[in-house]
Image (spheres, rainbow, N blue to C red):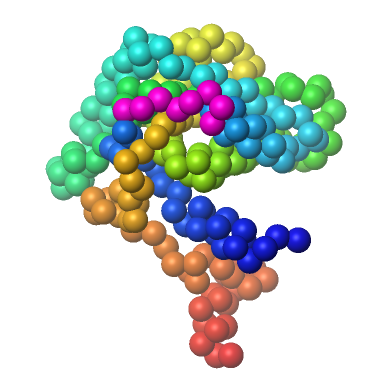
Amino acid sequence: MFSTDARDALYDIIRMRRDVRAEFSGDVISDDVLWRVLGAAHHAPSVGNTQPWDFIVVQDRQRLEQFAEHVAGCRQAFADSLPEDRKGTFGPIKVEGIVESGTGIVVTYDPERGGKHILGRHTIDESGLFSAVLAIQNLWLAATAEGLGVGWVSFYEEPFLADFVGASGPVRPIAWLCVGPVTALQEVPDLERFGWRTGRPLTDAVHRDTFVGTALEQDIAEA
């Protein structure tokens, strides 16, 4: 159905996707690109076709600075909680890019969208939340294809962000995404470059038949 070039481009985009912090160029995403990226997010699969997400676009600089100030306080609280050796590793790691990106996209989740009887959520209620996270992944990959960076900010207090964007229960904000043009995308993820944590090889994550079954790596070695 798709050409080899199209397939390879998709895998390249997945491989190149990064959680961007320091590489934002300072330019603001154009409206046409913004809508394409949001359109990709809105095309994500969702349980019961409920589309339980909304997207709040924040571009007012004063509001970006206000949220950045809140995040800085939360970041410092985390830093203060670390043992001394981890503080030294964490110190150089930038965790925001809120103002520098020029655009924040807050993704919200509404567990009541679709009513009480949602096909697919009868036994696994979290599938609604998982659907909103899939929208974030779509947005992230589309942004990468557009030459943009995305940084997922998680150093915030949820009640603060809910009040900040005017989301009231049962709707909750589940992510603040910094989105904007970048000067480059790092080849190696920041947390690996700064020594915080390295990634796992795929062969450690794939199992046969059960979680405690034979690892794929051993299957390959014995084939």
Q: Is residue 31 magenta?
A: yes
How far across and down, in percent of the image, does residue 144 sit? 48, 44
Relative vertical location of residue 77 with respect to residue 4 in this rendering, above or below: above
How far across and down, in percent of the image, does residue 78 sit? 28, 32
- Magenta stretch? 26-33
Q: Nearer the viewer, residue 126 or 98?
A: 98
Q: Which residue is painted at 45% across and 27% down in the image?
A: 29
Image quarter of residue 38: top right
Residue 151 visible at all? no
Relative vertical location of residue 65 with respect to residue 45 in this rendering, above or below: above
Relative vertical location of residue 127 with respect to residue 75 in this rendering, above or below: below
Residue 8 visible at all? yes
Q: Which residue is painted at 46% across and 21% down in the image?
A: 158
Q: Main secondary structure of the magenta part?
A: loop
Q: Which residue is painted at 80% across and 35% down in the image?
A: 48
Q: Is residue 176 left or right of residue 66?
A: right
Q: Residue furthest bottom?
A: 222
Q: Which residue is painted at 57% across and 34% down in the image?
A: 37
Q: Is residue 92 left or right of residue 143?
A: left
Image quarter of residue 156: top left
How far across and down, in percent of the image, does residue 146 sit? 50, 41
Relative vertical location of residue 83 with respect to residue 202 in this rendering, above or below: above
How far across and down, in percent of the image, does residue 24 sit? 33, 34
Q: Nearer the viewer, residue 132 or 79?
A: 132
